[in-house]
Amino acid sequence: MTATPGRVVRAAGPVVEATGLDRAQLYDVVRVGEQNLIGEVIRLSDNRAVIQVYEETSGLNVGSPVHHTGGPLTVELGPGLMGKVFDGVQRPLTTLSAGDGERSGGPFIARGVEAPALDRDRVWEVTPQVSVGDRVDVGDVVATTPETAAIEHRVVSPLAGTVTAIGSARATVVDPVVWVDDQPIAMLSRWPVRQSRPVARRLDPTVPLTTGQRVVDTLFPVARGGSATIPGGFGTGKTVHEQTLAKWSDADVIVYVGCGERGNELADVLEDFPRLRDPRTGASLMERTILIANTSNMPVAAREASIYTAMTIAEYHRDQGYDVALLADSTSRWGEALREVSSRLEEMPGEEGYPAYLPSRLAEFYERAGATTSLGGRPRDGSITIVAAVSPPGGDLSEPVTQYSLRLAGTFWSLDSDLARRRHFPAINWNRSYTLYRLGPWFDEHVAADWEDQRQWALGLLAQEEELQNIVQLLGVEALAPAELVTFQTGQTLREDFLQQSAFDEVDAFCPLTKQYWMLRVIRHLHEELVEAAEADADRGRPLPAGTVEAVARMRSWPPDQAGRLATELIERIEGEVQGR
């Protein structure tokens, strides 16, 4: 910090103006007031620095000291992040909440306190991946340590050169693990949150992030390294859907950021995640999860920082060669934080009071997603997939944050209040949702040759069923022709027995791709058999016996490894009953 501090000349909520910070640069971190509140320089004008403070500024006085730290906002990176809960500026909440009276402000964290994000005293078992005399490039893995049962932490070299020494097999995060050209490399590193980490190249998003959710994987898949947005009103299941993706998606690392959400919702997340069983290891899901918690009653400016903190942590694990899912709940609260700070700065408001730079800030966030190849002579492929919830006021999808997100994200899962009220979950409206990723070739190659054909059939039938719904509401079901009646009934089967899925059912919570394929194939075969029978003889197109209908409805309870056999048997049963009429 500077020997001669600056001084506060104006304070308006989280925005503070100070003079005397002659060497300050944009986005440098400062400490404000006697309590050393964390702040960031967001504007430089004449001899004044405008600072957004990440903590409550009540009690701050004109003339209070402002100390310049000399660098931007950075996060600590290294082993020990997994399973931790941080606030928006990477203060470890579990450590601070367990502190003494100086750190605890009743049920809240006292202002101005800080603690290292990574434990300096914990000793790790280190396995070197290089030998003395080896040549390493920037980005090469020089050592590993088992961080959890699910994650092996890979120490990446920030230097290029020759390995001159190897460290101890047991080390803390600050101890050198190797020396490159006599320069020590420790497991602990730091990175500015607003700066993207470099990569060798970006890869085409051609592989899906499988989630085990039928409406997502079959109809609207998101690419690994892509982005998806989930807008929906209150009670439509955004948080439950993101928690489901955290548990069941095939990502290696989960970074969950609660940005401005209600405290009780984040409390549920903090209680539920440690109890969730990781289907990969059988251990707690927290062993490959990092939580960034910034509730609605926390300082508004820290909401913006929380998004960048989460993204930087995600990029760090991507560069180790992992597939990362970054779940943001929600970007609407982030936009509201930008709007509040902008108003304090007396900037010209844009649409609905949001700052004019809202689209560019959202674009910066979404553009940091992607599938990439890391730097180094032995590169690794990794990815960051963004799934961002949006909470439009009153469920209005025309509001700015939702509309800008739609322009940037490749997949759109539109949550529907009507579906939620009818207890249809996931409440994703299949007529408003879409995906821009061309993943059909991957599914055709790895699951079934006619996967994309089955998907297009399902989307087409759901569109036809919606048109028939309008006719039925006006004229009644008697107005439908026999073949149309079959389409109407199949649409109901597709909605209730395929798209609807329980996140709390032990078997149905996760549906593998092969099981999804066989379930859809049975429903399509049922439809085609009944349509053909109805066109030949209207009586033969009548609904099947209750037992067969119930067997179709019970497909969700099939054991995944028996789905092909059971589907074949059910198809033969349907053919026999239809043709035997």
Image (tube, helix red, strand yellow):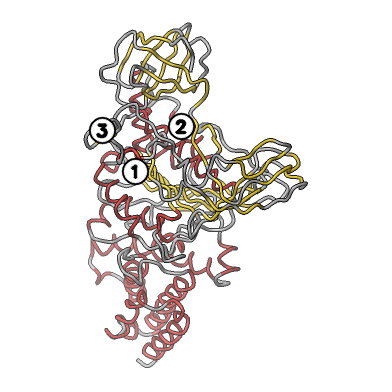
Three-letter residue code for mark 2? Pro
Three-letter residue code for mark 3? Gly
Of residue 434 and residue 286, the one placed in the foreground of this image is 286
Of residue 452 and residue 507, the one placed in the foreground of this image is 507
Q: Are marks 3 and 2 in contact (CB under 8 Å)?
A: no
Q: Cα distance, mark 1 to mark 2?
A: 34 Å
Total numbered labels = 3
Q: Residues within 10 Å of mark 2 (few under 14, many from 20)?
A: some
Label 3 or label 2, whichever comes before in sequence order: 3
Label 1 or label 2, whichever comes before in sequence order: 1
Secondary structure found at label 2: helix
Residue 499's x, y, as percent?
36, 65
Residue 261's x, y, as percent?
30, 41
Q: Which residue is mark 3?
A: 101
**In front: label 1 or label 3:** 3
Secondary structure found at label 3: loop
Q: Is residue 255 above or below residue 208?
A: above
Q: Is residue 31 above or below residue 421?
A: above
Three-letter residue code for mark 1? Thr
Q: Are marks 1 and 2 in contact (CB under 8 Å)?
A: no
Secondary structure found at label 1: helix
Q: Residues within 10 Å of mark 1 (few under 14, many from 20)?
A: few
Q: Is residue 250 above or below residue 400?
A: below
Residue sitting at x 48%, y 44%: 409
Q: Which residue is mark 2?
A: 359
Of residue 252 and residue 236, the one placed in the foreground of this image is 252
Q: Which mark is residue 94?
A: 1
Label 1 or label 3, whichever comes before in sequence order: 1
Residue sitting at x 35%, y 39%: 259
**In front: label 3 or label 2:** 3
**In front: label 1 or label 2:** 1
